Image (cartoon, rainbow, N blue to C red):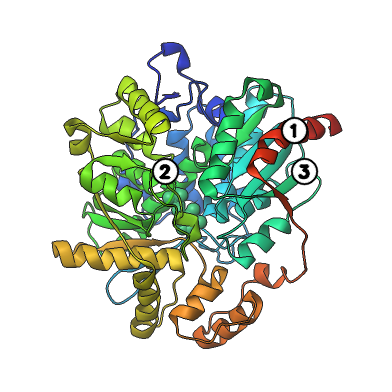
């Protein structure tokens, strides 16, 4: 059973299918499992990705049957992915990269957003919800296209995506606009990701909008989080298969972090019994999380900096609330209090008990210069091309090793295809990128790296038109737009 991070109320306990439908608890909290189930690691070795996903998800989704989960998993992880193994573990000179970007929109968001629409559909059936659902999503770039791709085939679900006008790459924007259609609206919001996320959260708590059956594709939905737990187990079983580690040997994960969803999934995997030494939280110059882990103070009152890793340009990491819940020993009232501080004052400080509960983590950040240097270095030394987000993680990993001397085997989650952010990658490789569009740069990068251009990029060459709303417009127009979608159906 799932419950809210903010309420002790026994009645707030609900099934996983209800939690997926609701997206977020009505008290503003996020759904969590009070007791996280354990899994036997040895049972998971030599399973393919789908079979492993079924085992892990079955444990975390209480009211879905194994058959339902099996059907969903095989439908989600099919030839939409450009490798049959779904994810790929690559060994380089000093670590492993877990490539999670082989789905349709070339970022790790596809791992969860291929599954969430199917879970939501099944959850609605289970709870006899006949009304259409409108999925509202804020994106810093990658969630939007992955959500649109995942939901576009669902007849009884509409989706509205808000993305910030600046900061995202040309490829990211084109990917989203290419999915604009009958059941999907894509709107550029004049602001940054936090503004878009605030708009969506406000809509969820707006009583006037209750009639619309809103749901969320953001990582606040447990249906996003659960599929992400799987690949941490998968990488471990691959390392076992390669005999790079022994059963029970601990490994590190480095995760390029924004909204704290991906790394939280790793934390849950650890709680389920995955042998993990450190979870290394890597940030870009929006290093609010580095400060949090190092000083115990979360302070979002700082300048929002646009970087070359836009999917991590976030000052309010929503999923951190779930970590606070577990690290405080499931203390709902404390979590509520801290979240109230965050909303009202823009910051909060954690107590000693929570601080102790964060011992699994190491945190650091990479500057823009360090990020580009990491791409260059990895390409020179290992002939391996990584994107800007993964480069932030790699750079932080180097800092971690220098600081701690820890030589534990380490897996870096590689969250986006390098061709998704071609300008920055070309800049890092010191190629001439001025005045060239993303497609030209991708062709040049493909020649240089010998990586073939993914089919999904080749299909994006068309010109698309976009809709831009100012923030005040957005708050005014949203109700009208929801009404139109509602009536149309
Ligand atoms: C979303 C995203 C991240 C950040 O993941 P969170 O779960 O939000 O912490 C990192 N890299 C890429 C490429 C992303 O799309």
Asked if residue 186 is positioned above or below residue 14 in the image, the reply reads below
- Mark 3 residue crowding within 10 angstroms, few (<14) / some (14–19) / many (20+): some
What is the secondary structure assignment of the residue under circle 2? loop
Q: Which residue is mark 1?
A: 482
Q: Which residue is mark 2?
A: 317
Asked if residue 68 is positioned above or below residue 285 in the image, the reply reads above
Which residue appears farthest toward the left when viewing the image? 405
Q: Using residue 450 as the reference point, say whether residue 229 is left or right of it.
A: left
Residue 472 position in % (x across, y down) = 66, 39
Is residue 259 in view? yes
Residue 235 position in % (x across, y down) = 37, 58
**Residue at x 45% of width, y 68% of height:** 388
Badge 2 residue CB within 8 Å of ligand 1: yes
Q: Using residue 1 as the reference point, say whether residue 295 is left or right of it.
A: left
Q: Which residue is mark 3?
A: 183
Specify the quadrant that holds the C terminus.
top right
């Amino acid at each position: 059973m799932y419950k809210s991070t903010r309420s002790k109320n026994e009645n707030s306990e609900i099934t996983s299918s209800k939690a997926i439908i609701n997206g977020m608890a009505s008290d503003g909290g996020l759904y969590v499992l009070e007791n996280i189930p354990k899994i036997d690691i040895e049972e998971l070795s030599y399973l393919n990705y789908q079979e492993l996903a079924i085992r892990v998800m079955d444990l975390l989704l209480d009211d879905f049957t194994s058959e339902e989960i099996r059907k969903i998993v095989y439908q989600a992880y099919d030839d939409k992915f450009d490798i049959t193994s779904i994810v790929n573990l690559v060994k380089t000179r000093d670590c492993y990269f877990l490539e999670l970007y082989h789905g349709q929109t070339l970022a790790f968001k596809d791992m969860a957003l291929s599954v969430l629409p199917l879970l939501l559909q099944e959850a609605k059936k289970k709870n006899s919800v006949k009304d259409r659902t409108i999925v509202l999503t804020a994106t810093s770039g990658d969630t939007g296209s992955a959500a649109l791709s995942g939901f576009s085939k669902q007849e009884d679900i509409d989706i509205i995506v808000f993305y910030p006008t600046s900061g995202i790459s040309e490829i990211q924007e084109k990917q989203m606009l290419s999915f604009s259609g009958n059941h999907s609206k894509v709107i550029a919001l004049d602001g940054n990701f936090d503004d878009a996320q605030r708009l969506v959260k406000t809509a969820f708590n707006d009583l006037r909008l209750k009639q619309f059956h809103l749901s969320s594709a953001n990582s606040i939905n447990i249906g996003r989080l659960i599929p992400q737990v799987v690949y941490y187990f998968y990488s471990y079983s691959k390392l076992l298969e390669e005999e790079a580690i022994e059963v029970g040997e601990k490994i590190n994960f480095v995760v390029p972090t924004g909204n704290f969803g991906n790394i939280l999934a790793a934390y849950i995997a650890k709680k389920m019994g995955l042998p993990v030494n450190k979870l290394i939280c890597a940030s870009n110059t929006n290093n609010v999380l580095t400060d949090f882990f190092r000083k115990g103070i979360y302070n979002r009152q700082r300048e929002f900096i646009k970087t070359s890793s836009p999917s991590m340009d976030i000052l309010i990491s929503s999923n951190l609330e779930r970590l606070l819940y577990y690290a405080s020993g499931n203390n709902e009232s404390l979590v509520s209090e801290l979240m109230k501080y965050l909303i009202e004052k823009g910051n909060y400080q954690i107590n000693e008990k929570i601080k102790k509960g964060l011992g699994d983590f190491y945190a650091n950040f990479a500057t823009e210069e360090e990020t580009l240097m990491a791409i260059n270095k990895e390409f020179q030394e290992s002939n391996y091309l990584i994107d800007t987000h993964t480069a932030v993680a790699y750079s932080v990993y180097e800092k971690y090793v220098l600081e701690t001397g820890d030589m534990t085997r380490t897996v870096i989650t590689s969250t986006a295809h390098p061709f998704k952010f071609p300008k920055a990658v070309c800049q890092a490789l010191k190629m001439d990128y001025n005045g060239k569009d993303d497609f030209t740069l991708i062709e040049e990068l493909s020649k240089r790296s010998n990586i073939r251009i993914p089919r999904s990029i080749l299909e994006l060459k068309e010109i698309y038109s976009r809709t831009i709303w100012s923030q005040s417009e957005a708050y005014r127009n949203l109700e009208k737009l929801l009404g139109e979608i509602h009536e149309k159906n």
